[in-house]
Structures are given as structure tokens and as C-alpha cells.
Image (cartoon, grey):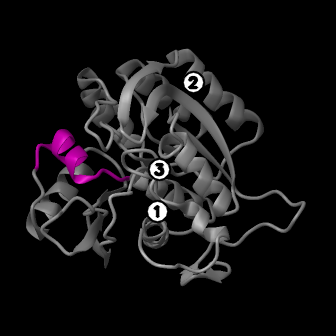
Amino acid sequence: MTGGTVVDGVELLPCAAPGSVPKRVLTIAGSDSGGGAGIQADMRTFAMLGVHGSVAVTAVTVQNSLGVTGFQEIAPSTVAAQIDSVMSDIGAGAAKTGMLASAPIIDAIVDQCGASGIGRDTSVPLVVDPVCASMHGNQLLADSALGTLRDRLFPLATVVTPNLDEVRLITGIDVTDTASQRDAARALLDLGPRWALVKGGHLRSSDHSPDLLYDGTEFVELDHERIDTVHDHGAGDTLAAAITCALAHGYSVPDAVSFGKKWVTRCLAAAYPLGGGHGPVNPLWRVSGPATGRA
């Protein structure tokens, strides 16, 4: 599908004319007080891609570039009410999930998404980014919620986008090469999503970042250069957010994932240091001029 303007080598999504209603998307995720991941990362990508983003906050984290020191869950009924409030008035062309924290929150989201017409068999596709831990290893999903994630949320997903650590937690498969990556994709698809994306960014044995997309029939390989930077906070959120935006524009899942991969690669190349730890990927490259090199 043809996009909009080409900026710094990336063909962006079409933008609505001034004064007209842009595409709308919804993120159901946790808040990052450091601004690098979570709903903050989602909203930055939504804005830079010209869509209107609405939010349903699941948890508030205490977090900076060094890690997560705590979080407070939002009441499941309030999470569901946020989704209902947005969808009954503003609506959305696609939605995504991020940090979901607990089984009761996941149950509330699944029930409300069903009532609001969000999910794989509806006109509002759902991207599930199964956030289990922060990049620093801080747990963001209760152990007791893994089963609920697999059994209830995955069957609702249009596409799931786990990294390799999340793949290991969810399927028990340790991805080390192409063969095990394909095994993981099959195992994820068996849990019910329409498509499974096994991200290869953590596959350090490769000098590239090989992602694998699978729908039960076709394997789609997406291979981009690995960006040499330690500043990759929010990369998974940013990828899933870009995929969500593309789906809202009517892209097929393979085209949406391909777009998201190009977008996050460019965001990684523009990443910047922030605080004393891992800085964030940078969707702001969209308005800051041509690339000047890697972070």
C-alpha cells in the first residue's frame, strides 16, 4: 500500500488535511514516568505518524533510564471504562496493548474489547505487545497472569509482537537460530492470534535484526541492519505503535509490520542518551531533519 511523503528514506503514512479528522488509534498500556516507553512512547509515534491517539492506562510506573522501582495498577473496572469511553465516542481504526500487569486487568480488557468491537475478527485490529518485563529485567506482568495472557488475550490478537525473552516466557522456546525462531512462531500461532511476529532484535548471534512473521501458511522474513546503540528504551512499544498506525490506515499485516520495522530502525538510528542509563528511541527524527549518524 502506498504511503505518504518520503522523509530521510522512510515512506511515511498519509496525513489528514488540516482541520479534517485523522486516523484514530487506541493504546491500552502502562505509563512510563521517564517518557521513553509505555503510553508515552506510543503517543510520540502516533503524533509523528499523524494519527490521533487515545489511551486506556493500565498501570503507573515509577521509572527512569536506570529501571523501574515500582508501579501501581489501575483498577480493572477503570481500565475497562476507559476503553468503553473512548470507543463509544471517539472510536479507533486499530488498537494495541502493552503493559497489562495482572490477570484481572487482562480479563477486563478482553471482555471490554469484545463489547467494543476490538480484535482479530472485527474491523478494529488489535496488536498485542506482550510486555512481561522492562528492558532492565524488572517484572511488569505477574507470573499468575501469563496463563491469562496466553488463553484469553492471544486469541483476540490480530498480531502478537514478543521479543525473544517474552517468547521464552510464553512458549518455553529459546530462540537461537532460524529454525528455533520458526518453531517459536508456530507455537505462538497455536495460541490463537491471526499472525505472530517473532522479533530478532535480541538475537545477538546475528549482525542484523531478523524478524519473522507467520500466519500458519506463510513465513515472512524482515531483515534490517542492527543499529549499534545502547539507547533502545521503548523500541518494542514504538514498533507495535507504528504497526497499529499502519493497520488503522488499512495496511495488510505484512505491510504494516514492514512499515513498523523501517520506522523503529530509523528511531533507533536517531536514539539519544538520557539520564544515567538507557536513552529512548527517537520518533522525533521525523521533525528534526536528516539523519546525522547513529546514536
First-in-chain label (1 vs 2): 2
Label 2, on which residue?
80
* Circle 3 Cα neighbour tier, 10 Å, few/some/many (<14 / 14–19 / ≥20): some
* Rendering coords of residue 178 (x, y %): 13, 69
Label 1 is placed on what type of residue? Ala
Label pair 3/1, CB-CB below 8 angstroms: no
The disc at residue 274 is 3
- Can you tell which of label 1 and label 2 is closer to the viewer? 1
The correct choice, above or below, for 63 with respect to 91 in the image is above
Q: Which residues are magenta?
A: 160-173
Disc 2, SS: helix
The answer to whether residue 198 is magenta is no
* Front-most of residues 132 and 107: 132
* Rendering coords of residue 271 (x, y %): 46, 62
The correct choice, above or below, for 231 with respect to 7 in the image is above
Label 3 is placed on what type of residue? Leu
Quadrant housing residue 275 = top left
Disc 1, SS: loop
Label 1, on which residue?
271
Mark 3 to mark 1 CA distance (whole Å): 9 Å
